[in-house]
Image (spheres, helix red, strand yellow):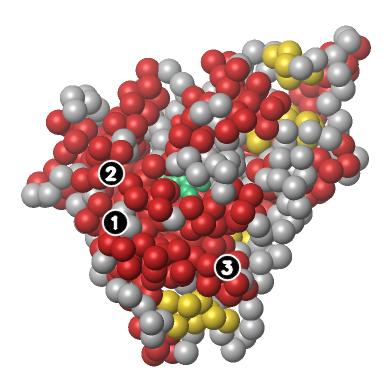
Amino acid sequence: MDQATKLMEYFSLPNLDRKNILPIVSATATASFLYVTYRILKTDQEKKQNFKKIPVPGSKYPYVGHMMSLGELPGRTIAKWHEELGPIINLKMGVQNWILVDDPVLAHKIFVTKGIDTSYRPHNVYAHDHYSFGGKGISFSQPDGVWKVSRAAALSVLAPKHIENYTPSLERESRDLVSRFIESTEKDGSVNPLKHLELFSMNVIITAVFSKRFDSVEDPDFRKLDTMVAHVIKNCGLENDLPNFLPIVSIYDYFFGGQAEQRDFIQNKRNPFFRQLIRDAAAADSPNVIKSLVEDGFKLTNDETLAITADLVAAGTDTVSISLQWNIAVMCRRPDIQKKVISEIDEFIKSNGRLPSFQERGHLPYCISVIKESMRFRSTTSLGLAHTTYEDLIIDGYMIPKNSNLISSMDSMHMRQDMYPNPKKFEPERFMNNLKTMQSAANGKLEERDHFNFGWGRRICPGIYLAETELFLAFVQMFARCYIEPSTDGLPDIDSAVNLGVTTAPVSYEVKFVKRANSLI
Ligand code: HEM
């Protein structure tokens, strides 16, 4: 949604006489104006020193800065600004200062080399005040004691040895996903993969976390949880945090606007639902994260446990399903690539009489390259998750002021000609020399990174191994059993996109999953 429209939504005060609020608003506006003026003067002083200038794109307005210039797809607008202005740019978002980087070498220096100083999360009103009980859990806590324990807990339960316990469930979910695709195509002529993919990735994560799964996209509890995930993804989107950009918004927003709705949603819908899931999981017979947390000796309060599990569900559902949505859309347009993928999968089945496990992925280099290329070609998140720093930093001759939001411009980074020759072409072959798991590439040397979708440094995604196992198993299952063909509406549109907040999805589309007559399984 356009920033101007969002702003107007925040300003709607249905039951309040606007005359009463005017003096408060005016006082806040004056204070905010003085604060912004102070920030501008301070930045000017900094410029006088001999640091390299960080370019500021031209299209900014008083007080709101670039907020109105980001457009529907901020990642793409920012990519254009990088093209014009270089690898590092500076945006003013109301009172916030954003530093965006699209050069992996510079990003590595900021997020990894200076990781101790740059692993903080900027304050997001929804994420901090409502969603995470004031900064508990993993994704939005600060890198102190709480985060260390929560992250250690997540790394422990998402470690390969734990994920391998969930392999039967992962295989079952992939099989079910493709069966639903085929059945829906046979019944209705074509299918929109979106909800089926969300059910797939949600079932994987909630089986692991709570020993629970949903049978169908019609299940009311699936719909509830799906809405909860969409709520987080939307409200944690960087550019949706209006009260933090414009302090003027926050006063009455707290009582009447977006925050009142957010608080109510978290307290009265999300929390009771998750508390019940946690109670059921503790009593379940099968292994799950809730039980592992206790068995592995993590001493967490109820709120901490809830915050961690909410993070795992939110971070692990939409990201995986959107990566697969892009993958399917692209593959539908490339029957030539489908043929090569199918031939590689069939070769494996002929020799082994079954589909490969994730551990046997080395036998399918082309499939791995297609999955990686799909994530490069269309980034799952356009701007990752922002970091911040509490210190002024000098990196590569640039002076990065403290409290800036530090953001890696994923869309732009993945389209760099110097890293990915012919970046606008979908060319899986570019990854044939880098078949490492995404997890080891992401955690290894900069030169060996394949793509940057999982973020950086101490905050790098702890779910990479699970994510790539899911992507691999769903991918081989699809092409072992189907061809993907366009629906009567034509080919999926892969040039447009929809900004969902944190993630960027393709525009809704339908395709056909046509059962392969010569399938070997
Ligand atoms: C294709 C799938 C996925 C993508 C593209 C993705 C991407 C990301 C990104 C960009 C970050 C922020 C990193 C940073 O701050 O630099 C992140 C953090 C995180 N991810 Fe993932 N993720 C995926 C799947 C998963 C899965 C399956 C899980 C677990 C179930 C997960 C759990 C988390 C958590 C808990 C964090 C917060 C880490 C922290 O703040 O310390 N993610 N992810």
**Are the two marked residues, 3 and 1, in contact with CB atoms closer than 8 angstroms?**
no
Mark closest to the chain's N terminus, 2 or 1: 2
Three-letter amino acid code at the position of disc 2: Ile
Q: Residue at x 88, y 9 (%)?
A: 49
Q: Residue at x 33, y 58 (%)?
A: 356
Three-letter amino acid code at the position of disc 1: Leu
Q: Nearer the viewer, mark 3 or mark 1?
A: 3
Residue 267 drawn at (x, y percent): 36, 46
**Are the two marked residues, 2 and 1, in contact with CB atoms closer than 8 angstroms?**
yes
Three-letter amino acid code at the position of disc 3: Ile
**Image quarter of the N terminus:** bottom right
Mark closest to the chain's N terminus, 3 or 2: 2
SS at mark 3 in the image? helix
Residue bearing mark 3: 337
Vertical relation: 100 (above or below) 359: above
Residue 398 drawn at (x, y percent): 79, 18
Q: Quadrant of residue 400?
A: top right
Residue bearing mark 2: 163
Vertical relation: 358 (above or below) 298: below
Vertical relation: 431 (above or below) 329: above
Q: Residue at x 32, y 42 (%)?
A: 309
